[in-house]
Protein backbone atom coordinates (compact mmCIF):
# COMPACT_ATOMS: atom_id res chain seq x y z
CA UNK A 1 0.00 0.00 0.00
CA UNK A 2 1.45 3.40 -1.00
CA UNK A 3 1.86 6.32 1.40
CA UNK A 4 -1.11 8.18 -0.07
CA UNK A 5 -3.30 5.10 0.26
CA UNK A 6 -2.17 4.67 3.87
CA UNK A 7 -2.96 8.33 4.57
CA UNK A 8 -6.40 7.89 3.05
CA UNK A 9 -6.93 4.77 5.18
CA UNK A 10 -5.82 6.76 8.23
CA UNK A 11 -8.24 9.53 7.34
CA UNK A 12 -11.07 7.03 7.16
CA UNK A 13 -10.14 5.87 10.64
CA UNK A 14 -9.71 9.45 11.89
CA UNK A 15 -13.36 10.20 11.15
CA UNK A 16 -14.14 7.73 13.92
CA UNK A 17 -11.69 9.36 16.33
CA UNK A 18 -14.48 10.52 18.64
CA UNK A 19 -15.47 6.88 19.14
CA UNK A 20 -12.04 5.99 20.54
CA UNK A 21 -11.53 5.84 24.29
CA UNK A 22 -9.98 8.96 25.79
CA UNK A 23 -6.22 8.91 25.79
CA UNK A 24 -5.91 7.05 22.48
CA UNK A 25 -4.54 9.35 19.81
CA UNK A 26 -3.46 8.93 16.24
CA UNK A 27 0.10 9.81 15.27
CA UNK A 28 0.63 11.64 12.01
CA UNK A 29 3.48 11.51 9.55
CA UNK A 30 3.63 14.75 7.61
CA UNK A 31 5.28 15.22 4.21
CA UNK A 32 8.09 17.75 4.09
CA UNK A 33 10.46 18.79 1.34
CA UNK A 34 14.17 18.86 2.09
CA UNK A 35 15.48 22.39 1.52
CA UNK A 36 18.97 22.01 3.00
CA UNK A 37 21.33 19.34 4.30
CA UNK A 38 22.63 21.08 7.42
CA UNK A 39 25.15 18.54 8.74
CA UNK A 40 25.70 15.05 7.32
CA UNK A 41 27.83 14.00 10.29
CA UNK A 42 24.96 14.40 12.74
CA UNK A 43 22.31 13.68 10.10
CA UNK A 44 20.46 17.01 10.20
CA UNK A 45 18.50 18.57 7.37
CA UNK A 46 16.04 21.43 7.07
CA UNK A 47 12.60 20.54 5.75
CA UNK A 48 9.72 22.73 4.64
CA UNK A 49 6.37 21.48 5.90
CA UNK A 50 3.54 23.64 4.57
CA UNK A 51 5.70 26.75 4.89
CA UNK A 52 7.15 25.86 8.29
CA UNK A 53 10.90 25.21 8.08
CA UNK A 54 12.40 23.00 10.77
CA UNK A 55 15.48 20.92 11.34
CA UNK A 56 14.84 17.19 11.15
CA UNK A 57 16.91 14.09 11.72
CA UNK A 58 17.53 12.17 8.49
CA UNK A 59 19.53 9.30 10.00
CA UNK A 60 16.87 6.69 9.24
CA UNK A 61 16.94 7.38 5.50
CA UNK A 62 20.42 8.84 4.86
CA UNK A 63 23.05 6.11 4.96
CA UNK A 64 25.40 4.08 2.72
CA UNK A 65 23.94 4.13 -0.79
CA UNK A 66 20.61 5.55 0.35
CA UNK A 67 20.84 9.35 0.46
CA UNK A 68 18.28 12.09 0.74
CA UNK A 69 18.87 15.13 -1.45
CA UNK A 70 17.67 18.73 -1.44
CA UNK A 71 14.30 18.88 -3.20
CA UNK A 72 13.21 15.37 -2.22
CA UNK A 73 10.11 14.70 -0.14
CA UNK A 74 10.14 12.76 3.13
CA UNK A 75 7.53 11.61 5.61
CA UNK A 76 8.27 13.23 9.00
CA UNK A 77 7.15 12.04 12.42
CA UNK A 78 8.28 13.72 15.68
CA UNK A 79 11.26 15.35 13.99
CA UNK A 80 12.53 12.25 12.17
CA UNK A 81 12.37 11.58 8.44
CA UNK A 82 10.85 8.09 8.37
CA UNK A 83 10.85 7.44 4.62
CA UNK A 84 11.20 9.07 1.22
CA UNK A 85 8.04 9.68 -0.77
CA UNK A 86 7.52 11.06 -4.25
CA UNK A 87 6.02 14.48 -4.93
CA UNK A 88 2.65 13.11 -6.04
CA UNK A 89 2.29 11.12 -2.79
CA UNK A 90 3.42 14.15 -0.78
CA UNK A 91 0.85 16.45 -2.36
CA UNK A 92 -1.95 13.89 -2.05
CA UNK A 93 -1.06 13.27 1.60
CA UNK A 94 -0.86 17.01 2.37
CA UNK A 95 -4.32 17.46 0.86
CA UNK A 96 -5.66 14.51 2.83
CA UNK A 97 -4.15 15.90 6.03
CA UNK A 98 -5.63 19.33 5.33
CA UNK A 99 -9.00 17.61 4.98
CA UNK A 100 -8.57 16.12 8.46
CA UNK A 101 -8.55 19.62 9.87
CA UNK A 102 -7.94 20.01 13.59
CA UNK A 103 -5.45 17.15 14.05
CA UNK A 104 -3.30 18.48 11.20
CA UNK A 105 -3.45 22.03 12.55
CA UNK A 106 -2.36 20.80 15.99
CA UNK A 107 0.54 18.83 14.47
CA UNK A 108 1.68 21.94 12.54
CA UNK A 109 1.52 24.03 15.73
CA UNK A 110 3.66 21.46 17.54
CA UNK A 111 6.11 21.48 14.64
CA UNK A 112 6.37 25.28 14.82
CA UNK A 113 7.44 25.10 18.45
CA UNK A 114 9.77 22.08 18.12
CA UNK A 115 13.53 22.46 17.91
CA UNK A 116 16.20 20.02 16.82
CA UNK A 117 19.65 21.59 16.78
Image (spheres, rainbow, N blue to C red):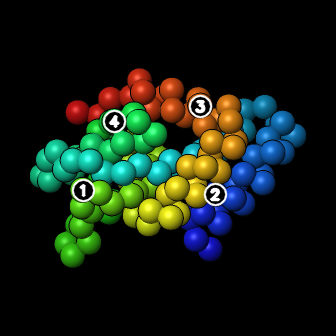
In terms of secondary structure, where does tag 1 sit?
loop
Q: Earlier in the sequence, mark 3 or mark 1?
A: 1
x and y percent of residue 82 in the render?
42, 57
How far, Cα to Cα, is label 2 from label 4?
A: 22 Å
Residue that numbered label 1 is attached to:
70
Q: In the image, 107: left or right of 114?
A: right
Q: Earlier in the sequence, mark 4 or mark 1?
A: 4
Q: Quadrant of the C terminus?
A: top left
The image quarter containing residue 112 is top left
Residue that numbered label 3 is attached to:
105
Residue at 39% x, 34% y: name it. Answer: 52
Q: Earlier in the sequence, mark 2 or mark 1?
A: 2
Residue at 64% x, 63% y: name it. Answer: 6
Residue 7 image label: 2
How far, Cα to Cα, is label 4 from label 1?
A: 13 Å
How far, Cα to Cα, is label 2 from label 1?
A: 24 Å
In terms of secondary structure, where does tag 4 sit?
strand
Mark 2 and mark 1 in contact? Answer it, CB < 8 Å: no
x and y percent of residue 70 in the render?
24, 56
Instruction: Please rate how many residues cluster around mark 2, counting C-alpha atoms within 10 Å: few if below 14, some from 14 to 19, many from 20.
Output: many
Asked whether 63 or 21 is in front, the reply is 63
Residue at 19% x, 50% y: name it. Answer: 37
Asked whether 73 or 10 is in front, the reply is 73
Q: In front of the other: label 2 or label 1?
A: 1
Residue that numbered label 4 is attached to:
53
How far, Cα to Cα, is label 4 from label 3?
A: 15 Å
How far, Cα to Cα, is label 3 from label 2?
A: 16 Å
How far, Cα to Cα, is label 3 from label 1?
A: 26 Å
Taking the image as drawn, is residue 52 in sight?
yes
In terms of secondary structure, where does tag 2 sit?
helix
Q: Earlier in the sequence, mark 4 or mark 3?
A: 4
Mark 4 and mark 1 in contact? Answer it, CB < 8 Å: no
Amino acid sequence: MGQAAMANAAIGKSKKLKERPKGEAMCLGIPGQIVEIIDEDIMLAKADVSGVKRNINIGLIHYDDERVEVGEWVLIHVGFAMSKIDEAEAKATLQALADIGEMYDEELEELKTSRIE
